Image (tube, coloured by chain):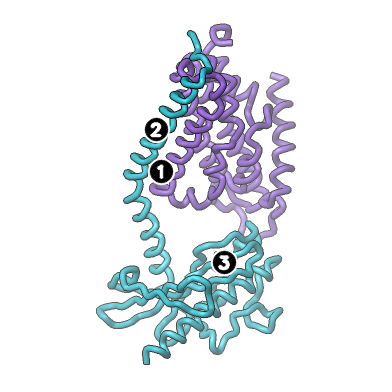
Amino acid sequence: MAGTITKKENFLKGVIKDNPVFVMLLGMCPALGVTSSAFNGLGMGIATLFVLLMSNIVVSLIKSQIPSKVRIPAFIIIIASFVTIVEMVLEAFIPFLYEQLGIFIPLIVVNCLILGRAEAFASKNDLLSSIVDALGMGIGFTIALTALGAVREILGSGSIFDFRFVSEDANTFILFILPPGAFIALAYLSVLFNKVSKTN
Amino acid sequence: MSKKESTFFNMIIALFVITIVAGASLGFINDITKGPKAKAKLERKVNAIKQVLPEFNNNPVEDVIMLKSDLAKDSIEIYKGTYDDQPIGTAVIGSSEKGYSGLVKIMVGFNPDESIKNIVVLEQKETPGLGTKMKGDKFLRQFRGKKPSEYNVMPTKDGGDVDALTGATITTRAFGEATQMAYDIFVETNKSKN
């Protein structure tokens, strides 16, 4: 796999061709759960990006030392450690975001995107490709979550990044803030994303 | 690159080393973030008190009174604000389990004449866009300057004086209940003092 594709292709693969949310449909739990506003989507995306990057780096560095029979528990411990670090740092320095994301921060551990990249990519490729892969996938995930959050916030609350463009009393599509709205928005965004990326 | 064989010994060593390193680094990060974490928590509390009380120059968080009451499961926190040793108000935490998705926790600031100065929402899991509007000024305005002894804090549907939030009567009811609880405790502590 490595060597046959350039770094640029490797990066763009995560952002566009194999976008984790819109194409591979991975990490649906946070993608649907926290994206009630654009800011939440962005925060969750960056937290996931950090964990993904760190776990890919560590897994890629120690891949030859891990016996293959215990690789999954080893990966999980590594991922869980970084998630706990993110949780502690967020609580200490960005308490506002920590409260907004709530239970979804510890749940980054079970985000199949991260374990998926550790298993499918970082454990088979060198450090540099793994970093590029993590950045591509993480940024793709962040863009997807932010887009989803933005659409839901615009339609559901009449604001974007907490900037209101309709009055507080205006009637908005509250449905889009609620869980069913997440599914609807995700479906239409996926269709749109695939349509646009396939035609180019 | 040769992979380590999956022998019993290799597996134990690999997992052992990984868990040790993970544990040690978590302990290290915990040590670093412990201070800022406690500070952030305290700041939140002080900010809430600042919003519900008139200007004070004591440290209400230090002079907190923890009160055990039949009205709530946990002990209730009461913060007294003073300005140059003159009492200027009391902040009481009120809560209700009857929100649309469980606990609603608020902090109510009372003026010395028992009227409500302001209310902030501390914890809630209500429906975004409906119940969360209880944080909005339009809703909270109904409570400011009112004495719960003369002004029924429950929604009009239950015979009270508060206009319920559109589509969130249950949240309004829980909010009223929490406000009433804070008031009852406030009155109770004032009585026991005299």
Element type at mark 3: strand
Which circle, 1 or 2, is nearer the viewer?
2
> Left or right of B87: which side holds A145?
right
Q: Amino acid at mark 1?
A: Val
Residues at discs 1 and 2 both on one chain: no
Give the mark nearest the N terminus, 3 or 2. Answer: 2
Question: Residue A104 versus residue B3: which sits nearer the camera?
Answer: B3
Residue A154 is at least partly visible in this image: yes
Q: CA distance from mark 1 to mark 2?
A: 21 Å
Q: Which residue is mark 3?
A: B104
What residue is shown at x 56% (from left), y 62% (from top)? Answer: B124
**What colour is chain B?**
cyan
Rendering coords of residue A61 (x, y %)? 44, 19
Residue A131 visible, this angle: no
Horizontal relation, residue A90 to residue A163: left or right? left
User: What is the distance, in whole Å, between disc 3 and disc 2 at their CAs?
Assistant: 41 Å
Would you place residue B152 above or below residue B123 in this image? below
Q: Amino acid at mark 3?
A: Val
Residue in the foreground of this view, choosing between A94 and B71: B71
- Chain that bears disc 2: B
Q: Residue at x 65, y 77 (%)?
A: B155
Residue position marked by numbered label 2 in the rendering:
B20
- Judging from the image, mark 1 belongs to the subunit labelled A
Residue occupied by mark 1: A89
Q: Colour of chain A?
A: purple
- Above or below: residue A174 compared with residue B109: above
Answer with the quarter of the image where residue B150 lies: bottom right
- The kind of secondary structure element at disc 1 is helix
